[in-house]
Amino acid sequence: MSLEIAQSIAFSGLAATQVRLSVASSNISNADTTGYTEKTATQQASVTGGVGTGVTVTGISGAVDKLLLKSLIGATSDLGSADTANSYLTQLQKLYGSTTSSTSSGGTTLADAIATLETALTSLAATPSSTSLQSNVVSALDNIATQLRDTSGSIQKLRGNADKDIASQVGSVNTDLQQIADLNAAIKQQAASGQSTADLEDQRNTALQDIASKMNINYYTASNGDLQVYTTSGQVLVDGNNAHKISYAAAANVTAATTYSAGSSSSGFSAITVNGVDVTGQITSGSIGALITLRDTTLPAAQTQLDQLATQLEAAVNAVSNQGTSVPPPTALTGTASVGSSAALSASGTVRIAVADQKGNLVSYQDLDLSGYATAGDLVTALNGISGVSAAIDAAGHLSIKATASGTGISINQMSSAVGSGGEGFSDYFGLNDLLTGSGAGSLAVRSDILSGGASLPTAMLDASTSLTAGSQVLSAGSATLTNALHGALTGSTDFAAAGGLGATTGSFTDYASSIVANVATKASAASSAYDIKQTTQSTYANSLSSETGVNLDEESARLSALQNKYSAATQLITTINAMYQALLTAVQSAG
């Protein structure tokens, strides 16, 4: 072998070893870098004229199992969905209160609040005229209404947060899509110049996994090296160097009425679009998929359950409160139902309207046969015909009945009256003596004048005797009839319609409130279990991929040591060849 060939072999070995040392050092320094895969420098022998002249590094590459990566992408998407659902359902469960408390009062759930009201009513029934016990009942009822309003408001706040999170996550996805498009261009450029693309491919795979954590996607690598990304229904997200970004704007305000409807932009929530195409329905996994489900299905279902409880509670309580009156009687009664003067009145039976003084003594009264009035206006005319009574339908369509003389008030006994398609009693139909007002859980409240103390709790009933005598006492606050009736309405059997995943059922209000709390607790528990399972699955795939493509520090350290020895050997060989060259040159010069 000539010295020239030996020198070529030594220098090529030195250069190749330098590259391999650099690769090994990079592997060690990036061992903890997310998404980094072990790189390998491939070398081959150089042959000239059938004679080996050294070695050359032909490329630096990283090996990624594509099937394992695809499994990891899917598991990452599932984990993103499970993580988000678990987080939100944990928050939802907390809204419903605790079944236990550190205080002697017990739990703080809706069922506990209703039980407290039942206890307050039991105490009041023993002493119906007690103003303090009446105040306890009002306070307990107000606590229920407040808890329903607060929980309802918090559910809508969660929906609003989910909507904002969707917008935020879409922004992150767009950043990743642009990064993949930019990396596609860089990878092609480096490949064309013969440079390694392995690190860039790692970055691209990391961005792909980040997208998958937020939404389910399809992808493949084209023959030119481009990573193409699509929605599950084929809407393109990355095509070569072009990122087709997702568009979404969060709603400015979210209420129970705010919904998403495919193909409609007037319902509240806008569509998630790509190039003008609605892809909302295509996103079923990842954090965005979970947020859509929470915003549009899970949380509205919880709201529906609360509304069912509130609606039935309002109807049951008001049906009882409209049977009675407070003592002293109120100067005026204004209904909550809306009617028009010319609206047909479908009514039958008899209602008693009385004017009494502050002590409950009769001033005047009249029994009205409701079947004789064709319209609400006819009824108003009849009411105005009662001595000491003034009636009207105001601009909002509410029936108002007032006592005209100072120191007197209005009392009603519904008697046999049946009004409207539901056959409610007269006062109940018009909402003249409602204890609760509002529409659904979000607005349920104790009537403001009772809550403020401006009016008393309706615990008395107008005397239903065949005939009454002016001056006689027709109202007494000492009766427990209404209090017991209200207690019975709460603890007796009420029909609850199917709502938010809960089937139709019959039971007490405490039972139904407990079923709502239990339903949410079950969902939260299931979400927590699902998160644990998905996390384990994703970790298994991630660990498998890391085992195959990650950096083994022990192996890399050993390789680095071996390469350093080879580098020293190549350096020593070059030194020896140089010495031989120098000796040869000296010999030639001496011979001359």
Image (cartoon, rainbow, N blue to C red):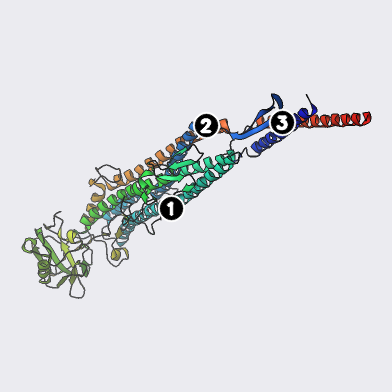
**Residue farthest front in this picture:** 592
Who is closer to the viewer here, 424 or 366? 424
Q: Amino acid at mark 2?
A: Asp
Where in the figure is residue 256, as x and y percent of width and height?
A: 32, 54
Point out which mark residue 352 bears: none
Q: Quadrant of residue 391?
A: bottom left
Q: Which residue is mark 2?
A: 65
Who is closer to the viewer here, 217 or 419? 217
Q: Quadrant of residue 476?
A: bottom left
Q: Which residue is mark 1?
A: 167
Where in the figure is residue 550, as x and y percent of width and height?
A: 59, 34
Q: Quadrant of the N terminus?
A: top right
**Spatial separation of the CA atoms under disc 2 and disc 3:** 27 Å
Q: Amino acid at mark 3?
A: Leu
* SS class, disc 1: helix
Who is closer to the viewer here, 242 or 37? 242
Lateral position of residue 67 relative to residue 351, left or right: right
Where in the figure is residue 135, as x and y percent of width and height?
A: 32, 60
Mark 3 touches mark 1? (CB < 8 Å): no
**Residue 404 visible within the image:** yes
Q: Amino acid at mark 1?
A: Ala
Q: Is residue 587 above or below residue 321?
A: above
Which one is earlier in the sequence, the residue at label 3 or at label 1?
1
Q: Is residue 384 above or below residue 491?
A: below
Q: Is residue 343 above or below residue 541?
A: below
Lateral position of residue 480 relative to residue 167, left or right: left
Where in the figure is residue 21, as x and y percent of width and height?
A: 70, 35
Point out which mark residue 563 bears: 3
Which one is earlier in the sequence, the residue at label 2 or at label 1?
2
